[in-house]
């Protein structure tokens, strides 16, 4: 089913409905949505079946029904660049992979990579994605490719261009602002996609571009997507250059006067946390990428105690190496327990909340999605209860956070349209898409000269001892 159901209503039933809203977890529950993609009822299966006798039923009553995951931070420009530089920290990884690719990447390649990774995201229960497309091919309007790819898959999203102009040969700041404007205009016609202005890093943009960006927020009402306090080196550089942390610098420049979601926020002082609370800065926690790049551990329990809005992100496919939300969700819980040596540091319901309604709040979308409540949009995931990982359901929250995998996903609806059916993304020839992506990834690696990083650019060293 790739079109809205007209007058037909649909009931999605499960052994549990995890509403992530006021109704909590409902045993032997169901969700009803209408042909326009609006949730109309949530409650006990037997009650909703009786009051909706003509509705089409999905689910055998053994699975778990939940809101779609909100991927609070990723980079869709990295869709064709997975599996390189696994021994690098953040800035080394930039120089070895991201910057060389960013110079030659095209809009069409980003659209292709977005479709490829969008299939992976839908297959792991993601219905909304917050993207920051980063590149250095100015003039090519490369970030618009992410919008094209998401629209082709019918996914809900927020897209920004992660502008940075502090590098040799960068064009004038006005050129970066032109891409922001082009992206905003392109998104204006897309029903499920919103725009945010992107700041790649606050140390990576010049004072002039910073001022133009803040002025754009003021003049257009733009919300912001950025990175803050990701690595220790960032703090040292900011203190040398600006006499303060990057979070304080963002505040002084006026960026935090606007709605902001910031990726990472690992290296935060007490003053930083106080500023984040006072300015209501939202955080996108990316545990898998933070571990791969050895960046550090985000103080999520502290943020939650302070009332900071926190969502969970996969981060980009080149730093995470996947866009699987279940991996990010499980790691989000495990890393806090290990870091604090406290098994009670964070609970499965808290992790589940961050991955759904918490992510929606962080993006200002909580009136539309993130929980299964009447009046909200039908972004719904049905997990199959007949798989090895979900056949046993003593605690449905723990089962989803620590046991479920992408294999558990049976069906996914976005805005009432079924985008995954019986575990398969609808309308996609995966063999053809894989072939197209494979060929493009080889071409990109060769054009970017990724010698020593890609096997397509020369032999690699596979060391087993250090």
Image (cartoon, grey):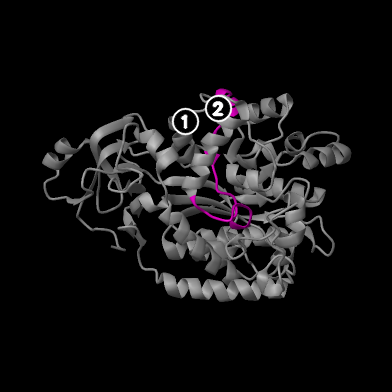
Residue name at image x 29 percent, y 45 percent = 385
Q: Is residue 310 visible?
A: no
Query: In the figure, 172 relative to 60: above or below?
Result: below
| Relative image position of residue 134 (x, y in whole percent) | 66, 58
Task: From the viewer's perspective, tell me whether residue 87 is left or right of residue 82.
Answer: right
Q: Is 370 placed left or right of 185 in the picture?
A: left
Q: Is residue 215 magenta?
A: no
Q: Quadrant of the N terminus?
A: bottom left
Residue 421 screen position, x and y as percent: 31, 59
Q: Nearer the viewer, mark 2 or mark 1?
A: 1
Are the residues flagged by discs 2 and 1 in contact, CB closer than 8 Å? yes
Q: For numbered disc 1, what is the local secondary structure?
A: helix
Residue at 66 percent of width and 46 percent of height: 226
Residue 85 appearing in the image: yes
Looking at the image, residue 176 sits to the left or right of residue 59; the answer is right
Say whether disc 2 or disc 1 marks the residue closer to the N-terminus: 2
Range of residues picked out in magenta? 301-324
Q: Which residue is mark 2?
A: 304
| Rendering coords of residue 96 (x, y %) | 75, 61
Disc 1 target residue: 350
């Amino acid at each position: 089913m790739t079109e809205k159901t007209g007058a037909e209503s649909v009931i999605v039933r499960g052994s549990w409905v995890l509403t992530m809203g006021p109704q909590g977890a409902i045993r032997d529950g169901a969700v009803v949505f209408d042909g326009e993609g609006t949730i109309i009822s949530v409650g006990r299966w037997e009650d909703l079946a009786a009051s909706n006798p003509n509705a089409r039923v999905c689910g055998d009553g053994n699975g778990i029904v939940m809101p779609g995951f909100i991927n609070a931070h990723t980079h869709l420009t990295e869709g064709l660049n997975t599996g390189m530089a696994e021994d690098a920290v953040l800035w080394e990884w930039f120089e070895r992979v991201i910057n060389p690719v960013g110079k030659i990447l095209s809009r069409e390649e980003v659209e292709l990579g977005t479709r490829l990774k969008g299939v992976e995201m839908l297959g792991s229960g993601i219905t909304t994605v917050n993207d920051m497309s980063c590149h250095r091919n100015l003039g090519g309007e490369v970030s618009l490719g992410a919008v094209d790819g998401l629209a082709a898959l019918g996914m809900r999203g927020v897209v920004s261009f992660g502008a940075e102009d502090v590098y040799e040969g960068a064009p004038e700041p006005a050129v970066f602002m032109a891409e922001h404007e082009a992206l905003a205009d392109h998104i204006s016609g897309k029903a499920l996609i919103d725009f945010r202005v992107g700041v790649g890093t606050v140390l990576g943009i010049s004072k002039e571009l910073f001022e133009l960006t803040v002025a754009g927020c003021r003049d257009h009402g733009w919300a912001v997507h950025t990175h803050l306090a990701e690595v220790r080196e960032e703090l040292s550089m900011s203190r040398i250059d600006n006499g303060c942390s990057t979070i304080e610098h963002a505040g002084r420049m006026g960026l935090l006067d606007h709605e902001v979601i910031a990726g990472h926020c690992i290296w935060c002082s007490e003053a930083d946390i106080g500023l984040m609370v006072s300015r209501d800065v939202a955080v996108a926690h990316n545990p898998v990428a933070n571990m791969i790049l050895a960046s550090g551990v985000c103080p999520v329990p502290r943020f939650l105690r302070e009332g900071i809005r926190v969502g969970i992100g996969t981060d980009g496919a080149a730093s995470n190496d996947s866009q699987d939300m279940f991996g990010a969700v499980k790691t989000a819980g495990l890393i806090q327990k290990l870091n604090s040596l406290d098994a009670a540091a964070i609970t499965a319901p808290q992790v589940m909340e961050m991955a759904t309604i918490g992510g929606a709040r962080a993006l200002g979308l909580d009136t539309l999605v993130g929980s299964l409540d009447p009046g909200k949009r039908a972004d719904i995931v049905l997990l199959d209860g007949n798989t090895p990982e979900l056949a046993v359901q003593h605690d449905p929250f723990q089962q989803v956070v620590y046991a479920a995998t992408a294999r558990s996903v049976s069906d996914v609806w976005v805005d009432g349209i079924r985008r995954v059916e019986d575990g398969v993304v609808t309308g996609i020839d995966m063999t053809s898409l894989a072939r197209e992506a494979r060929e493009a990834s080889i071409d990109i690696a060769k054009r970017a000269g990724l010698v020593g990083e890609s096997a397509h650019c020369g032999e690699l060293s596979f060391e087993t001892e250090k």
